[in-house]
Amino acid sequence: MKKGIAKIFCVIGISIFLHTVYSALQHRKYLRLTDQPFEGVPFDIVVECIISLFLFAWGIINSQFLIPIKASTHLAKKSFDSYDYRPNFTVFNHRGKYLNEILNK
């Protein structure tokens, strides 16, 4: 039952956010028609956006879509040397050769 309610909250959060976007676009259009400068989005649109964010976040967190990441089982199968091996970072043309010549004079 909790999973179904969480999905409903996700849908409500997304729909409120889409309404917020539409309201912001309408506000910009109204300002253009009345030749007023854009000074920001009205407070009610900001509050509506924050409410939609919290509803959507609550729905995602409680919907059980998230699974825990267990790296310990994957890391236990390999040695550290296999993770440390990076052949793309191996460089043979570097200053060490010239420093060796200078130091051995």
Image (tube, grey):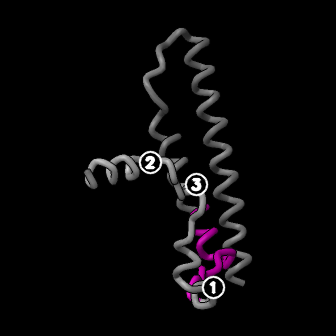
Q: Is residue 36 left or right of residue 100?
A: right
Alpha-carbon span between mark 3 and mark 1: 37 Å
Whole-percent x, y for residue 103 in the image: 26, 53
> For residue 7, which quarter of the picture?
bottom right
- The magenta segment: 56-72
Give the residue at mark 2: 94
Looking at the rendering, in which quadrant would you find the N terminus? bottom right
- Residue drawn at the location 49% of the way across and 42% of the way down: 46
| Residue 59 lies within the magenta run | yes
Q: Is residue 84 above or below residue 51?
A: below
For marks 3 and 2, the one nearer the N-term is 3
Image position of 102 (left or right of 70): left
Reading the image, the residue beneath label 1 is 74
> Mark 3 — residue?
52
- Give the distance between the C-alpha atoms of the residues marked 3 and 2, in whole angstroms: 55 Å
- Label 2: which secondary element: loop
Q: Tell us which disc is closer to us: 3 or 1.
A: 1
**Label 2: how many Cα within 10 Å (few below 14, some 14–19, many 20+):** few
Residue visible at 53% across and 60% down in the picture: 54
Indicate the secondary structure of the residue bearing disc 3.
helix
Tell me which numbered mark, 1 or 2, is placed earlier along the sequence: 1
Tag 1's secondary structure? helix
Q: In this rendering, which labeled residue sits more in front, label 1 or label 2?
A: 2
Q: Tell me the residue at 63%/29% (across/down).
A: 25
What kind of residue is marked 2?
Answer: His
Farthest top residue?
A: 35
Relative to 16, does residue 37 appear above or below in the rendering?
above
- Nearer the observer, 60 or 29: 60
Q: Which quarter of the picture shows residue 19?
A: top right
| Dot 3 amino acid type | Ser
Disc on res. 46: none
